[in-house]
Image (cartoon, rainbow, N blue to C red):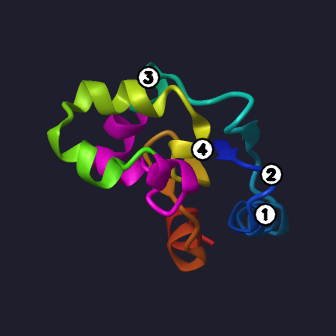
Amino acid sequence: MLFIQYPKCTTCQKAKKFLDENKIKYTDRNIVTDNPTKEDLENFIKIGNLDIKKLFNTSGMKYRELGLKDKLKTMSDDEKLELLATDGMLVKRPLLVGDDFVLTGFKQELWADKLKL
């Protein structure tokens, strides 16, 4: 499994603690130093059957600074993916990527259910 997170994010820290306490093996990836590529994001959408909007960190400062709430309405999916690939701080975190699922954000009950804990 791939765990994509921002180390300073308290929600990411909670998710990591949850994975560690439940002895879940994962590869840890810093979303800032190793931002998901456009290809990664396309793959996540396919695996997780996600709406592209689910990948945006809508509560982030960068999202607000760029005025994306309004701009996204007129952008194509390709443009949205290109934008997400430019800056990890635009991407919803944490992300947990399995062989057949992608979880965005950390909701302990949902993660426990998906990981069959």
Residue occupying the far left of the picture: 74
Which residue does the numbered mark 3 point to in the structure image?
Answer: 38
Q: Which residue is mark 2?
A: 7
Distance from the alpha carbon under mark 1 to that under mark 4: 16 Å
Q: Which element carries disc 1, helix, strand or loop? A: helix
Q: Which residue is mark 4?
A: 89
Residue at x 21%, y 34% (from the top left corner): 75
Q: Magenta segment: does it hold 19?
A: no
Work out whether mark 1 precedes mark 2 in sequence or the reverse, and give the earlier one: 2
Q: Residue at x 58, y 62 (%)?
A: 115
Mark 2, secondary structure of its residue: loop
> How far across and down, in percent of the image, does residue 58 sit?
44, 58
Image quarter of residue 23: bottom right
The residue that mark 1 highlights is: 13
Neighbours of disc 1 within 10 Å: few (<14), some (14-19), many (20+): some
Q: Nearer the viewer, residue 8 or 36?
A: 8
Q: Secondary structure at mark 3?
A: helix
**Residue 61 in the image: x percent, y percent?**
56, 55
Report, in whole angstroms, how far the alpha carbon at label 3 lies from the one at label 2: 22 Å
Q: Are the residues at dot 4 and dot 2 in contact (C-beta closer than 8 Å)? A: no
Residue 107: where, in percent of width, then height? 55, 73
Highlighted range, magenta? 42-65
Depth check: give the residue in front, 20 or 30.
Answer: 30
Q: Amino acid at mark 4?
A: Met
Q: Report the amino acid beneath label 3.
A: Lys
Reply above or below: 45 against 16.
above
